[in-house]
Amino acid sequence: NQSLAHPLGSNFYNVNFLANYQNDKWMLESEIMYAHYGRDSLGTNLGGNIYQSYVDPEFQFGNKIAQGVKHNLLNIRLRLNYLISKRDDFRLFSDITYYHLNQLPDENNYFLRFGLRINWPDYR
């Protein structure tokens, strides 16, 4: 029972920047995402919620992207991978993520992760 929509829903625009660097054993990945979007305030239907009905919109004409309660979202992720086995694409990785959402109060979060990743190919 989940939507097949963008995680921000609707009523937004965003910019994504991806850059990768790789040599024999090491890979550095970076991702920056900025989004500007509008949310519905109490009792309004301005397009910020994909579950609201389209039958009774707030305005029939004159709508624009990111109308409503304005939000800006910045998400930055850096990941470092070390390749252990090329055959199985077995990797050790670590990444750090910075998440900033300007709402009242501003939300700033940092996430640090470590892990192992393996892709077993189908050897039939």
Image: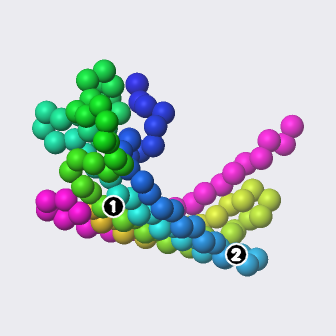
Horizontal side of residue 97 vs 119, given as left or right:
left
Q: Is residue 114 magenta?
A: yes
Alpha carbons under labels 2 and 1: distance apart: 29 Å
**Residue nearest the observer in this picture, 93 or 23:** 23
Under circle 1, the secondary element is strand
Residue drawn at point x = 35 percent, y = 33 percent? 50
Look at the numbered discs 2 and 1 and tell me whether their residues touch, using CB distance below 8 Å: no
The residue where tag 1 is placed is 73
Horizontal side of residue 114 vs 26, given as left or right:
left
- The mark lying in front, picked from 2 and 1, is 1
Residue drawn at point x = 54 percent, y = 71 percent? 30
Horizontal side of residue 10 vs 104, given as left or right:
right
**Residue nearest the observer in this picture, 109 or 14:** 14
The residue where tag 2 is placed is 22
Q: Amino acid at mark 2?
A: Gln
**Residue nearest the observer in this picture, 72 or 123:** 72
Under circle 2, the secondary element is strand
Numbered disc total? 2
Q: Is residue 46 visible?
A: yes
Looking at the image, is mark 2 or mark 1 earlier in the sequence?
A: 2
Image: 8 above or below 52: below
